[in-house]
Amino acid sequence: SCGSAATEGEEDDDEEEPATSAAAARSSQPAPKKVLPGMQVEYASPLEGARGSYYSGVAMHVDGKVASFRHDELRAEDGAQAQAAVQLKHLRPLPPPPPEGFLSSVKRGARLELRYLDGWWDVVLRKRLGGGKLRVEAVGYGAVHDVEPAQLRPAWKWTKGTWRW
């Protein structure tokens, strides 16, 4: 598996702080204040082996602190899109597309998300490689990947009403 079980407080602060604080000051975008029925969302998996990953889908129904979530990628045995009742705290609105050229401003240690295994996984930029590739690491899993820029997006953080990275 790939992803990061570590929280921001568990990561190496001297490496992360300069990379993310500069980016956060540069990029924030308006966002919905809450998840509503019919909204395109991402589900943050709380499951062991999938922590730090996000999967796209639709919030079908919202009832208190629980929502019915229909996966975009995951299928049930009959081939239909899989659905599950999930805690609302594990859903967020679908993040905006990456800002144009955002990767040119990120530095070593910056938190990003990698498209991997039908989801987006928390990773940290470790190195810029030749040919435009980047080396990223899913810190909580020790998994290192050399990837194309198109496989990465900002590690968007949703606070009700705003997206920041």
Image (cartoon, rainbow, N blue to C red):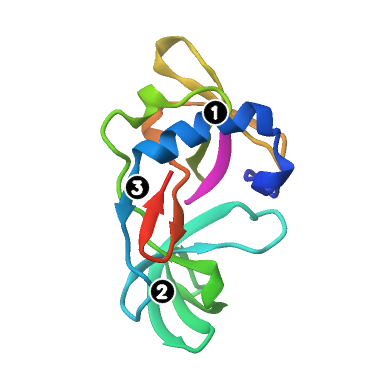
Q: Residue at the left extreme? A: 100
Mark 3: secondary structure: strand
Q: Earlier in the sequence, mark 3 or mark 1?
A: 1
Region rendered in magenta? 118-125
Q: Which residue is mark 2?
A: 80
Instruction: Classify residue 39 as left or right of residue 77.
Output: left
**Amino acid bearing label 2:** Ala
Instruction: Give neighbour class at mark 2: few <14, some 14-19, many 20+ (Cα, 10 Å).
Output: few
- Total tally of numbered discs in the picture: 3
Marker disc for residue 28: 3
Instruction: Classify residue 96 as left or right of residue 87.
Output: left
Mark 2: secondary structure: loop
* Residue 135 in the image, given as x and y percentages of width and height: 55, 23
Residue 93 visible in the shown view: yes
**Amino acid bearing label 3:** Ser
Q: Which residue is mark 1?
A: 18
Mark 1: secondary structure: helix
Residue 117 visible in the shown view: no
* Closer to the camera in the image, 145 or 18: 18
